[in-house]
Amino acid sequence: GLFPRRAGARDGHTSFVTMNFAASAGKPQDGSGTPLKAVQIDGQVVMKIVKHCTDHSPSLVTGQLLGLDIGATLEVTDCFPFPSAPVGPAADEEVDPDAGADYQLEMMRCLREINVDNNTVGWYQSTYLGSYYTEELIETFLAYQENIKRCVCIVYDPSRSAKQGTFSLKALRLTDRFYEIHKAGEFTFEKIADKSLSWSEIVTETPVTVRNSALAAAVFGELTESTLREEESGVVQSDLDRLHMSTNPFLERSLEFLSECMDDLASEQQKVAFYQRNVSRQQLQQAQWLQKRKQENAQRKASGLEALPEEEENAAKGVTEPSRLEGFLIANQVNQYVDQIQEFGQASLQKLYLVSGTQGVDNIAPRTPEA
């Protein structure tokens, strides 16, 4: 199909190149000190991200973020796109896994030669209707944080920004608790319960501010003033985009994705239930075996024979515990879709009331057939 299931996973080539580059980008950074409270992005960087994601939509793309990590604020001052995976006949050709990382390191070297900030602070990626809670996102975060402790992922949704009049740009980070638990290899049922880790404590959203230089602000002011002079009503196209009434496609697609996520969540719950049944069955078998062995040892002891060991040889194998990460990510994705549907529904209802008022309609509720 045009959009993959849950539409959040980037292609495997791009994900591998990103993590491969993260492992070779610069010296490890010290993440201690002041907690990160905000991400400040230059206006030019925002325009580059929007253009790259919009030009390649509906394909999902990604790129590198460059900047400075200063105190409680992470400043993003530049960016450049990652090479996209080949399409068409070229997609069947074998791709060098180091080609993307070499390209990115060469780009940073060129930027350093012209005195542009070349410190890696994270990456950006496009998404479709907020479908970004995937294992690829977590794996890329973990690869980056081996060297960059306070890295961020900027997620931009061109599908929402184009039609809804909403600028859908977010800055995401892994929570410290999840990173420590996952790094220690303790992401099991017992450890999660012991640490009281919730599904909502995997990824956190960091406030984003857009910064423009004084010269850019002056240019924007002149452009805005000239536009308002040309428009007699003082209304520009961006104001009209907010009144776009066609939200049905977005609601329909969000409901489809939500339905798929609920099926995935039910499947994960079945895996957990199957695991718990197997554990209970194995514990019962071990208890029965141990009781039988004790009775056998009592008989051997009465006969003057040496007692047999009371430890089952296959007891150490146990039952393989399913990963809880996928279930946590699906729960986050369900929450994201629910928030989007609620936001779309509220905006649509407000627009309907506005239009009904201009057309003199008192009640916008659909008529019900009389009994």
Image (cartoon, rainbow, N blue to C red):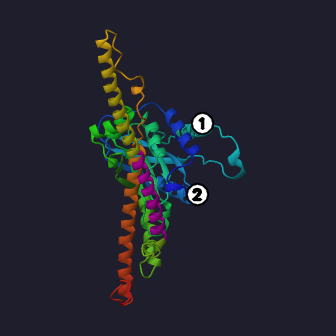
The x and y percentages for residue 51 are: 54, 58
Q: Is residue 270 one of those drawn in magenta?
A: yes
Instruction: Tell me the kind of residue under disc 2.
Output: His
Does residue 76 sit above or below 28 in this rendering? below
Q: How many marks?
A: 2
The x and y percentages for residue 308 are: 36, 15
Residue pointed to by mark 1: 102
Does residue 90 appear in the picture of this structure?
yes
Residue farthest toward the top in the current orientation of the protein? 304
Foreground label between 2 and 1: 2
Quadrant showing the N terminus: bottom right
Mark 2 or mark 1, earlier in chain: 2
The x and y percentages for residue 161 are: 46, 64
Residue range of the region highlighted in magenta in the rendering? 249-271
Relative side of 3 to 87, left or right? left
Magenta span dominant secondary structure = helix
The structure residue drawn at horizontal position 35% and vertical position 81%, both measured from the top left corner, is 353
Q: Nearer the viewer, residue 292 or 203?
A: 292
Mark 1 secondary-structure assignment: helix
Mark 1: few/some/many CA within 10 Å (<14, 14-19, 20+) = some
Instruction: Tell me the kind of residue under disc 1.
Output: Asp
The x and y percentages for residue 239 are: 42, 73
Does residue 280 sit above or below 157 in this rendering? above
- Which quadrant holds residue 311? top left
Residue pointed to by mark 2: 56
